[in-house]
Amino acid sequence: MLSALFAAGDAVTSQAVPLHWYGRFARFNLFLAGLHGACWFFFDAAQRGRALARWERVVIGVALAMALASLVPGVAISNHVVAREVSWLALTYRDVVPTPLGSLVSVYYVVALAVLGVRTLRDPGPGGRAQGIALLFLTATALHDTVVFTFALPTPYLLSVGFLGVIVGVGVSVTARFVQNARALETALRALRDTREVLVRQERLAALGEMSAMVAHEVRNPLAVMFNVLATVRRGVLDAQQTMLLGILDDEARRLQRLVSDLLDFSRPAALRRAPVDVAALVHTAVDAALAGVADLSPLPAVAQDVAADLAAVLVDAELVRRALINLLDNALRAPGCTGVCVRATNDGDALALSVCDDGEGIEEALREKVFAPFYSSRPSGTGLGLAIVRNVALAHGGTVAYSETAGGGATFTVRVPRVDASAA
């Protein structure tokens, strides 16, 4: 608004009006220039979300005092009107010659805007560079008009062009800040949505864990009775059909026992007991245990172990990591079409990476997001808790577990466990 009023007052100098009007508009324009400079400091502080510094308040106070003094006839503007012709524009300007104080006031405004423009360029912020350039452009045009106004040079005023540049610069600045705020809001909303999903999942898992622990506890005792009864019955003389039926009963009871064990592993709080562990020995014992659990498979897939030679002892809960490896190996060995499994242990930056790869059929893309969900299993005899337990173990160590396709076909699961020092452990 101040820029528009100043431009309107500036236009009067090229119009034929009574002589006393030129002095009035010149005083009014000098007053507007003071207000305009002061408003820039307020605008800059508001954009940056800060209070005005003491020196800024002094600059504003002096500018406002000079602006008010400019309204008094004879203080900053004399009554002497000088006509100057700009032939190439076919315009004749009629300027009122300023007093020495008026020239000083104009220079003060120019210097104040220049200081603000330089500071904006040094610390631009979002869109601040365009705003700083616009301020310096305005300063240059204001300095030009001050010289023209003081010495009545035969050149046109350019301050209106400077105001146009300011409009463009402020528009760019405001747009840049809007874009930044929109992106920040989008990021915050995404983080809030992710946090909400994590909280909902944790609440569901906590309720599921409590229920699993209760069910497992109630089922474990009847299972022990069933195994005792089976052992007693088998001591007697049985025909072929009775032997077959008892075998089915034993298989189902053992499957139920595995489910109870997995439920307890899933629901048990992962209280870490970190200690230095030999990774090669840990991998070897996990492979032996996994192979013993799939002795019924025929043919049994080959298992290769690839442990980096430069692996130092790591601080982990050996039992939990071993349990996670056994679950991954069991899934890999039982994968459809699997003929070979490879277990790798490598350094991955500041973490230990344990990978289990198979050459089976892999996992369909539509199902990959579900594999870590509790009780999800693609095998009829699976409990659906193996990968959920692996994820809990990884999270308990502050790590991650991820799925990827094996080169040539198959599934690869990688557990990444960050290294910690002894004091942190």
Image (cartoon, rainbow, N blue to C red):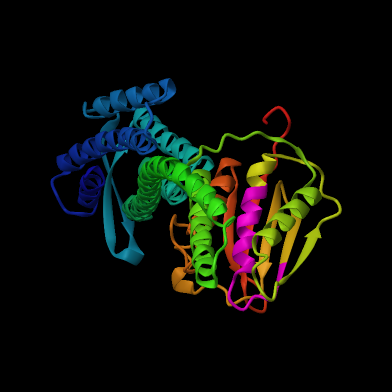
Residue 300 is situated, as x and y percent measured from the top left of the image, at 70, 72
In the picture, which quadrant includes the N terminus?
A: top left
**Is-magenta flag for residue 334?**
yes
On screen, residue 375 versus residue 296, left or right, reads left
The answer to whether residue 153 of the structure is visible from this angle is: no
Residue 323 to residue 58: above or below:
below
Residue 54 shows in the view:
yes
- Give the main secondary structure, helix, strand or loop, of the magenta stretch: helix
Image quadrant in which the C terminus is located: top right
The residue at the point 62 percent across, 62 percent down is: 330
Query: 158 or 360: nearer the eye?
Result: 360
The total of numbered circles placed on residues is 0
Q: Is residue 62 magenta?
A: no
Camera-side residue of 83 and 330: 330
Q: In this rendering, would 94 be left or right of 236?
A: left
Residue 402 lies, in percent from the top left, at 57, 59
Q: Residue at x 35, y 43 (%)?
A: 149
Instruction: Left or right? Give the position of 368 relative to 402.
Output: left
Identify which residue, 61 or 128, lies in the foreground: 128
**Up-down relation of residue 184 to residue 306 (above or below):** above
The image quadrant that residue 67 belongs to is top left
Residue at the front extreme of this rendering: 237
Q: Quadrant of residue 414?
A: bottom right
Residue pictured at 57% horizontal, 52% vertical: 231
Q: Position of residue 56 (x, y in %)?
A: 40, 26
In the depicted view, which residue is nearer to us: 251 or 210?
251
Q: Residue at x 20, y 41 (%)?
A: 25
Residue numbers of the magenta segment: 322-341
Report x, y in % for residue 418.
66, 44
Q: Which residue is farthest left?
A: 18
